Amino acid sequence: MNQVVKKNALVNVLVVGGGGREHALAWKLAQSNRVHKVFVAPGNGGTALDSRMENINITEPIELLAWAATNDIALTLVGPEQPLAAGVVDLFRSKGMRIFGPTAAAAQLESSKAFSKAFMRRHGIPTADYDTFTDPALAHAFVDRLGAPIVVKADGLAAGKGVVVAMDIAEAHAAIDFMLVDNTLGVAHNEGGARVIIEQFLIGEEASFIVMCDGKNVAVMATSQDHKRLLDGDLGPNTGGMGAYSPAPIVTPDVYNRAMREVIFPTIKGMAEDGIPFTGFLYAGLMIETEGENKGQIKTLEFNCRMGDPETQPIMMRLKTDFFEVLWAATEPGANGQVGGRLDKIELEWDRRTALGVVFAAEGYPMSPRKGDVITGLPSKDSTVGDDALVFHAGTAAKDGQTLTSGGRVLCVTALAESVKSAQQRAYEVAQDIGFAGMQYRKDIGHKAIKS
Ligand code: AMP
Ligand code: GLY
């Protein structure tokens, strides 16, 4: 099948996923005057309420393809990493359907830490020194030799739980055992079984550096910073992200140039040279040195092959360019089944204000979030509050006229304002009306960017 879409005709699009990131992507796509309807699979309580969107209860890639092919979908955008690692892009492309994301082979930059570390070493991309192990005895001996602090990472996808930053060696030994021996995390093992990366502990400040790629050209997304820890002051367990803001002042013009020159361009070039051109969002988690003689130096902590959640929510709020047109240019088919892409023709325009999003999580998150609590005080229909705030849904479900919690991260209240401080104030002000039993949230989102 080959998709023919008349120039400037209204089209339907499909967003795969059901988190806060996908609500924000669908919200932005729905504003395009090229888009008729945004289908979201499976979507959430927020996308269910918005008349421009419709939820489709499908998650399996093969079923998504069959549904998209028979429902006049002009373009598909994939939010989360699991369907990408499972080959949803390969499947859609094999039928001539437009889809934005990396192939399963390219998604290994995220789905296999052993792949991405070896890739970075091979192409001279700055990252922490490391070694890879399948034998627990050798891994334990390595930790004994290097000492703590040290970082132990499971090779496969682990829903953000596969990294232990061990401050003493007992913690590192325990991590090796539960990753290599017991697999209590439920890591999706890659070929060859359980594997860990043990790497040098890095100090500095983290930033999320996200770009769109069409295989050879790059369009850079606005900079952002996430808050990984559950509690105020960056304490408590690691989470998927408790809040984010854009732009991130830590990414100075110098850091930006280094990130492009040392990380992004060599990665796009390296993937193409290795015969697996990267298409989709490339998210480099960067550690930036903030002190001493190496101030401003960057190292790549990890690659993700998708947008960040919750970084997407503030980033989409700042994007002024028609997002459908951007994705359409990025997915232009090339000759003879090669990737095409016209991202070189795209100029992304950003609102110069700051957007800041605060995540509201369920009781028990991140270990065992409770579901089924009634959420009160939500804005009706399209999730907007005035013209400067939005309540993006994540783990929510619409039931009998109510919205219930249905996952760990429940909502992300996002506001746009002149400064980080005023965006923070506005987000917390909007959130005052919203509540559910056991709600957890941080009260200091944006603190690193607010000068006291
Ligand atoms: P990753 O999934 O590799 O980004 O790791 C999750 C989090 O663990 C990162 O966001 C960092 O906060 C932390 N982390 C990962 N690798 C290192 C490292 N080499 N040194 C210090 N912290 C790290
Ligand atoms: N917020 C971090 C991530 O999306 O991986």
Image (spheres, grey):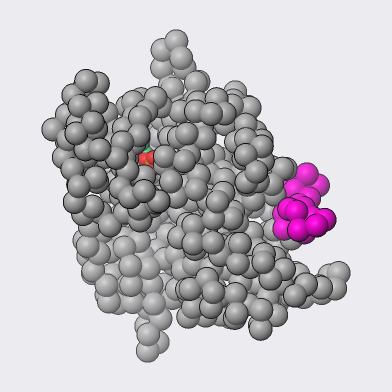
Q: Position of residue 384 (x, y in %)?
A: 53, 67
Locate the N terminus by quadrant: bottom right
Q: Magenta: predominant secondary structure element? A: loop
Q: Residue furthest top?
A: 293
Q: Position of residue 233 (x, y in %)?
A: 28, 38
Say whether residue 380 is left or right of residue 130. Answer: right
Name above or below for residue 57 compared with residue 395.
Answer: below
Q: Residue furthest right?
A: 7
- Residue sitting at x 41%, y 17%: 291
- Split into quadrants, the picture shows ligand 1 in the one at top left
Whether 339 is among the magenta residues is: yes
Say whether residue 15 is left or right of residue 114. Answer: right
Name above or below for residue 393 compared with residue 301.
Answer: below
Name above or below for residue 274 compared with residue 40.
Answer: above
Q: Residue furthest left?
A: 170
Q: Position of residue 11 (x, y in %)?
A: 73, 75
- Residue sitting at x 27%, y 28%: 150
Name above or below for residue 18 compared with residue 248.
Answer: below
- Residue sitting at x 56%, y 49%: 106
* Residue nearer the viewer, 158 or 283: 158
* Residue nearer the viewer, 420 or 442: 442
Whether 126 is among the magenta residues is: no
Locate the C terminus by quadrant: top left
Q: Position of residue 133 (x, y in %)?
A: 31, 36
Q: Which range is magenta?
A: 330-348
Res. 350 visible in picture: no
Q: Residue furthest bottom?
A: 400
